[in-house]
Image: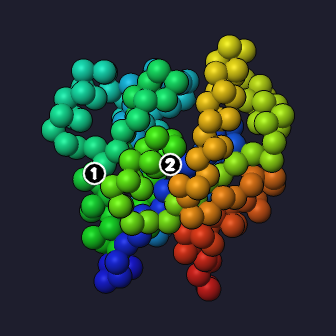
Amino acid sequence: MGAEAGRLVVISGPSGAGKTSVCKALKTDPRVTFSVSATTRPRRDGEVDGIDYRFLTPDEFDAAEARGEFLESATYNGNRYGTLRGPMDEALADGRVFVLEIEVQGTRQLRFGNVPGTYVFVVPPSMEILHERLVKRGQNAPEEIEARLAIAREELGASDLYDHVVENVELDATIARVRELCGLVPTEA
């Protein structure tokens, strides 16, 4: 792929919509470089610094932002998130597909900054199903789930920021559709 121009793919969606599962599937494609976001949120069980996220203190995050190291940054549910510019520039120069899994606030910054790419919004079939998924996940207290649902309602109103809205009814079909939108059609053996 080195001689081709790389492409940026932005994937967003409400918490529990399935965007992380979709992105996990895309990570298995050797043509993809995946952004590792920086965050100030606490590390969850099993998460590894530098693989799942780059975990920063609020002061470290502010310093990196002041140095202009972020392509975008956002606050979500009281925590800061940001995409480091350097890894994306390297991947695109190498002709790779660079995938960003970011929140709507970050997408808004990229769109208003006229950053070219393919923007994909993964959505749940309904708010009821989203609620069920968040509960089944077992990672959040009831009040956190309610906060995430309130945020999801707001985020769903921002679908016009995206080139494609993909309803995640069945995960394998959703993954196949997003692969297609990213230009990651299977290679013939």
Residue shown at 24%/27% (left/top)?
62
Residue shown at 25%/53% (left/top)?
86
Q: Position of residue 104 (x, y in %)?
A: 51, 43
Q: Secondary structure at mark 1?
A: helix
Amino acid type at image mark 1 = Arg
User: Which quadrant of the rendered structure holds the C terminus?
Assistant: bottom right
Compared to 153, does 89 lie above or below?
Answer: below
Residue, far left: 67
N-terminal-most mark, 1 or 2: 1
Pointer 2 local density, CA inside 10 Å: few below 14, some 14–19, many at least 20: many
Compared to 176, does 71 lie above or below?
Answer: above
Q: Marks 1 and 2, how far apart in space?
A: 14 Å
Q: Position of residue 35 (x, y in %)?
A: 41, 50
Residue shown at 60%/70% (left/top)?
181
Tell me the tag on residue 85. 1
Is 112 in front, or is 164?
112
Amino acid type at image mark 2 = Glu
User: Which quadrant of the rendered structure holds the N terminus?
Assistant: bottom left
Is 74 in front, or is 174?
74
Number of callouts: 2
Q: 70 left or right of 101?
A: left
Residue 51 can be seen in this image: no
Q: Secondary structure at mark 2?
A: strand
Is 45 in front, or is 84?
84
Residue 89 can be seen in this image: yes
Residue labelled with disc 2: 101
